Image: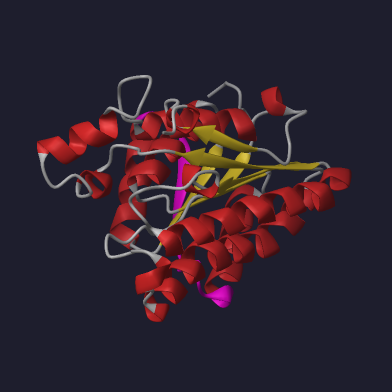
Amino acid sequence: MTGQLAGKRAFITGGGGALGRASGLAFARAGASVAVVDVIADAADETVRQVAAQGGEAVAIVADVRDEEQVRRAVGEAVEAFGGLDTLFSNAGVMPHQDRSVLDADLELWQTITSINLHGTALCAKYAVPHIVAAGGGAVVNMSSFLAVLGTSYPQDAYAASKGAIAALTRSMAVQLGPRGIRVNALAPGPILTAHVEQFFPDPQARQLRLDRVPLGRFGMPEDVAALACFLASDAASWVTGQVVVIDGGISCNYL
């Protein structure tokens, strides 16, 4: 395959989920070899199957991003499969429906969310970045959220806090790694229409209330996120680093 990621070797976490699968398919169509990393083997395998069906190259790797040894092993497997890494997309994350206001904080839930969203992102960087340095440079794309840049009347405070931390980590990494030829950016999506997000809309009225806040008149799709991730990972974004790029259909410009 040829395209904006031709010859790149990408490590994508959460690669069996909706956003990860869309991104894996998009990266492969753009020419990248993709390590599809997920805690669920069948989900990773299905993404690899779909990548292969469109003529791309991918390998499935099972790992829990909370576990340092599993992350170290997963990165090693990807490097062995592709001969190195150029790109890290730390996409794995959770957004539990039971997440509420900090005033009702469940510490165990906070720890679960933080361990996956924030600590998982940090561990993947710890083990993948040295290989990207060895390859002569490349790109890291982290997954933040538009909740890192604005408040919400539907509190998801543990999730928002973890994604705000990822935004800060992204900027710190960009300063550290720029001299080594590595760009670090983050995506900050608004509501992306997945089966999981659909459950936040218990009835048509609740769905329409959320939709009315979107100037572009629709919810985002996984493919919207995948397209932006591809751009940030590509040489077309060669002078873009340290940015938390909001992709929310204009919600954050229309906050009331």
Percent position of residue 179, x then y: 89, 45
Res 54 → quadrant: top left
Percent position of residue 238, x then y: 75, 28
Residue found farthest to the left: 203
Q: Nearer the viewer, residue 237 or 41?
A: 237
Residue found farthest to the front: 256
Residue 135 versus residue 193 in the image, above or below:
below
Q: Is residue 169 left or right of residue 144?
A: right
Is residue 49 visible in the rendered image? The answer is: yes
Res 123 → quadrant: bottom right
Q: Nearer the viewer, residue 186 or 11?
A: 186
Percent position of residue 167, x then y: 62, 50
Q: Is residue 140 left or right of residue 225?
A: right
Q: Is residue 56 magenta?
A: yes
* Magenta region: 54-69
Residue 92 versus residue 251 in the image, above or below:
below
